[in-house]
Every structure is written in C-alpha cells, then in structure tokens.
Image (spheres, grey):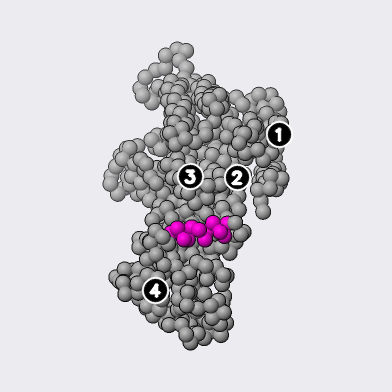
Amino acid sequence: MTGKTQTPLVELRDISIAFGGIKAVDHVSIDLHPGEVVGLLGHNGAGKSTLIKCLSGAYRKDSGQILINGQPVEINNPRDARAQNIETIYQTLALADNLDASSNLFLGRELIANGLVDDAKMEAETRKIMGRLNPNFRKFNVPVSALSGGQRQSVAIARAVYFNAKILIMDEPTAALGPHETQMVAELIQELKAQGLGIFLIEHDIHNVMKLCDRASVMKNGRLVGTVDVNEVTDDDILGMIILGKKPAKAA
Amino acid sequence: MSDTGQGVQTAAPRRSLFETLEIDARLLGMLAAFAAVAIVFTIWTGGTFVGPRNVFNIAVQTVPVAIMACGMVFVIVARHIDLSVGSVLAMSSAVMAMSQAYWLPSLFGLAYGSPVILVLTMLIGFAVGTAIGALTGWLVGYQGIPSFIVTLGGLFVWRNLNWFTTNGQSVSLTDPNLLMFGGTEGVLGATASWILGLVASAVAVLAILSSRRNKLRHGFTVKPVWAEGVMMALIVGVILFFVGWLSRYPIPEAKLKRMFEARGETMPEGYTAMHGLPISVLILILVAVVMTLVARKMRFGRYIFATGGNPDAAELSGINTRLLTVKIFALMGFLCALAGLIAQARLQSHGNDIGMLEELRVIAATVIGGTALAGGVGTIYGAVLGALIMQSLQSGMAMVGVDTPFQNIIVGLVLVLAVWVDILYRKRLGLTK
C-alpha cells in the first residue's frame, strides 16, 4: 500500500453537483495516490460516473475543490483535464465510428507536418502502441465501427496510454468484453499501475474490484458511504456497503 | 475474381481490380451514372451533347451549384443542414451589385470599370456572405437552435433583405472586370489552357508519387507499381482531354471582331481563337482541391468528420464543437458569396430571383454525391460530380426537347433513385447495421 502521508496525486474535496434540484453528488471527498487503483462502486445512479466526470471535464462541479499533486486546479472542460494529464476511458467508448483507429487515437491532438495532418506518422505510431497493447490488432485502415468491442476498447485504452496519462479514469472498461479481452485489460491495469499511474476504476463486478483495486470507495444516492482498503475487507463487506449503505465496523 | 481460401491470414488475398486501384465503389457508381447520362444524350442528340460547345456550357453552368455543394458537404457531414444558401447567394449578390453599380462609384467617385471597384465589391460581398454564415453558425452552435430552423428562417430573411436592398429592381452589370468570372467572357485561350493542363497533370503525378514515398517510408503496403501507373494515366488523361476539348471551341467571329474593335484594332483576316478553360471553372477546381485538402489533411476537416461521426466523442476529445459549427457555416456563407459573384457575372445582371431554389439543387447534388444526411460521411469530389450529373441531365433533356416540368420531375426522381441505390448497395455489402 502506498504511504498515505505523501501528497495524493488527486484529491477531490467536498464535490457537489446537482441537476435540476436532484443532488447527483453530495459533498463527496475521495483521493488517489500514484501507483494506486481506487475502485468506485455503487448502484446505477449512485453518482459514480457523475463524480468522475467532474474530474474529466465532461461536467462542471457546483462546489468543492480539485487538487492535483496538492495544487488546486480548475477543470472546466475536457481540454483542461487533458492539460493535467488526466485521460478518460468512457463507458460509452468515446470514439468517432466513421474514423479509423489512428484518427481516433490522435483525435484533438493530431500530429502535424508542414501544417497538414501527418496520417502516415500517426498510423505508424498507432501500430507501435497497438503492437504493445493488442498484438493481434490488424484493422488499421477501416472505420472503428467495423471493430469488435474488445478492439474498440483497446483503441480507447491506447489513446489514454499513448499520451502519457498520469491519472487514468476507466468507466467500466470491461463491460462490453469477453473473458479473454477482460484478462487483457486486467493485465494492462497492473502494468500501468507499476508505471506509477493513478487509476480510478468504476466497476460493477465485485470480483474484478477485489482483484484489481487497492482501495474501494462506495457511493449511494450521491453520498460517499466510505472508503476501505480492499485487503482488509471481504467482498460481502463491500456488497453490504453498496446495498445497505453501511460501512463495516472493522474497516478503518 | 476468384476467391482464394478465406481465413488464410498469411497469404495476401487476391483482390479485385478496383480494390487494387483503391477506387471507391461509390465514386465508380457515380462515374458510371455520369457516363450513362453522357452516352444516352450523345446518341439522342447525334453527338451535339459532347461537342466542345455544350461541354463548355455544362461546365460553366455547373459552377455555382458545385461551389456551394462543396461547402454543403461540410455542413451535412457535421449533421447540420443549410436551407438558406440560395438566399445567402442572392443577398451577397445584391450587395455586390449595388456596390459596383451605385454605392462605390458615388461614394468614392471611382471611374466606371476601375479594377478597384471590383476588388472592393468582392471584399464586401465575401464579408457579407461570411458574416451571414457566421451568424447562422452562432445561432446553431452556441444557442442550440436546430440548423433546419435557423436556415429555414434565413431562407425568408435573406431572400427578402436582398429584395429590399435593390428595391426589387434588377441591376444590370456590365463591368468587363466582373464579367471575366462569368464563363464565356472570361476564358484562358488555348495556349494558357494547355500549359495549365500540363502543370496540373505534373502536380497530380508528383502528389501520387510523394504519397507513395511517404507510405513506403513508414513501411506500409502500397499499391503495385502498375496500379499507380494506371491511376496516373487516368487522371492525366481526364485533365488533358477536358483541356483539349475546350480548346477546340472557337470564339465566334463576330465577337472576336468586337474584341478587337474595343481595343481600337482591326481583326486580321482569317484570325481565330479558342475558348479554352473558363475562369469560373478554374475557381471551382481550386475550391474543390482546397476543400478536399481541408477535409482530408487538416485538423478543421478531421474535426468536422469526427463531430459528424460522434458529437459526444468529439466534445470529449477536447474539440470545441460550438466554434467548429460557426466556422463551418461561415465557410458555407463565403462559398455562397463566391457562387453569387460567378452567377451574376454569368447572367450579367443581378435579379431578385437569382439563386432561387438553388438550396435544393445544392443539397440534391451533395446527396447524389454520396454525403449521408446522418452525418460523418461525404466527399467533395462526390458533391462536384453530383452537381455535374444533375446539370448534364438538365442540359441534355433541354437539348432533346423535354418540357421543363418533366425535366424537374426527372431530376427529383434521380435524387431519390441515387439514395435508394446507395442504400441497397450498402445493405448487400452489410455496411449498415
């Protein structure tokens, strides 16, 4: 476990956001250290995705503070988040279906040569990174709509990895994947963690949480139920937190 | 083509001729349709249809719609629509007509026919078109009003503001500098056309070679050498044929005499001159090339296609989609003004009804050219070809004496047929879900 005394990589302090009177996130505070995977759990509508979208810039928080390496930052749109090396892999796979893999990987950050988009260079870079992440990937010149769920996911992950993310947000990265591809993502998470990235993982599958995460923060009805060290609790404890909204007595 | 063992990944599968040449099947379909139209009318008219004179006329008549169709591709790819292009054309044209005929001469006391007048006129006209487009884009992008509504409103507003600007009167335009843009009055002549055709051929060959070298440098597979050669030969052939054909269209003797008299000279006996390339067609080619470059090789174009494919993904990738919308419509407005300049120069006047119903022809040309109304898919060359096919049909039907109502009925049917065939084709290939 990483030392809790050092400055967290990310600290979300007292975040609130409401949509038309409904408090989707209600004074929630969580943090993330380098080389750590923090799971975010809760029922549908518990506010996990909404909370994390405040960090990725898709939503603007109503109140609260975001600190990166101890410094307060303003994140008002996805561009701000990218400037802080925050990369997000969305549940809905934010890919443009009509473009090919390399166009998607570099979307918004195209490589430019002589004022023009350098497609050949971008494809070469895409081949390099995909060779590392998913060596079986061959479909470089077709729109991503022609790819399988796993292939699409690896494009989305490659995008996050290529641009040297320090903070990675994964919103149910294995939801659309088969067992083999799920394993691939699990290995990748371990590798990125070893490289010192901090990862927020939104996940429904309790087994994946126990396997991949160091800590787990559970939300219910927009509020934080609690944060626990995964090693110190059982999966039943966590399920109890999700369903009943109660923190187990023994966990710190 | 024979099928060589499916699922064998190591051996490169044999591919069809068109796949090897990397010619888009949709482009092929359009070329076939265009060829069919040309062949039918050539036989029907006993050859007049493909004569240099008619080819010249069709080319010149296609220009305004084709220029606007280039902009419409971007608009539709980004999941918008612009119903106001005909009215914006009229509005820009009205401002340009009034500028050169009344405002500028009286305001600055500039002499009639001074090139300064035309330059200022063009700047004013382009500024008006671009500003109208930017306003539309702001209402759509930043205020969230559907583009269908904004531009439907614009169709009424700009058409009638055009009327108000000219008091509903036609403005006769005789400035020789302006008429250059119209077509028959502004041609390069045979020699210059040939030189330009050869230069264009050389550029096309060099572009293919440099693209191939770039691919090889990164170790990608390239087309076989013979396929590159065939493509080069095809492109160069089309360019030189077009140039050569227009260079065989003589300028009428009476007109040549007038041209000499205007310069205070007398025409030598037996003097002849050919039309060659019209300047308006050159402008269209320039617009199409630049727009293709923007679509394929620049961030602006890439973002338009990404936004059309998945607006949320574009937004989350850090693309400012609102500003993008403003830019797309501003560009559309600029192209409307450019088309307006060419249209008024060709007609040698600005009338109230200039560009009337042009929005429908522009959208039809774009859609026939393979741009999907659902967004994300479309090509510039397709739109230009679409405009050319429609103009050829109309011109051919007029030549063989089809009544006007039937001409319009057939154009309407062709539009629906083109999209229908495209849908059937995509279904058969399993391209649609």
Q: Determine which residue is flagged by label 2.
A: B370
Q: Which mark is residue A127?
A: 3
- The CA span between labels 4 and 2 is 50 Å
Whether B301 is drawn above or below B48: the answer is: below
**Residue A27 appears at what percent x and percent y?**
42, 82
> How busy is the neighbourhood of tag 1: few (under 14 within 10 Å), some, or many (20 plus)?
few
Is residue A31 rendered magenta in the image? Answer: no
Could you tell me which chain the residue with mark 3 belongs to?
Answer: A
Q: Nearer the viewer, mark 1 or mark 2?
A: 1
B411, B376: nearer the viewer: B376
Residue located farthest toward the top when viewing the structure as drawn: B269
- Confirm whether circles 4 and 1 share one chain: no
**Residue B322 appears at what percent x and percent y?**
44, 60
- Range drawn in magenta: A181-192
- Sequence-wise, the earlier of marks 3 and 4 is 4
A117, B395: nearer the viewer: A117
Whether B180 is drawn above or below A221: the answer is: above
- The CA span between labels 4 and 1 is 58 Å
Q: Nearer the viewer, mark 2 or mark 3?
A: 3
Q: Determine which residue is flagged by label 4.
A: A31
Quick check: marks 1 and 2 in contact, CB under 8 Å?
no
Which residue is found at the position 69% from the left and 24% from the top?
Answer: B46
Whether A144 is drawn above or below B114: the answer is: below
Q: Which mark is residue B64?
A: none
Q: Determine which residue is flagged by label 1.
A: B3
Assign a secondary structure to mark 2. loop
Magenta span: helix, strand or loop, mainly?
helix
- The CA span between labels 1 and 2 is 29 Å
Which residue is found at the position 53% from the left and 84% from the top?
Answer: A245
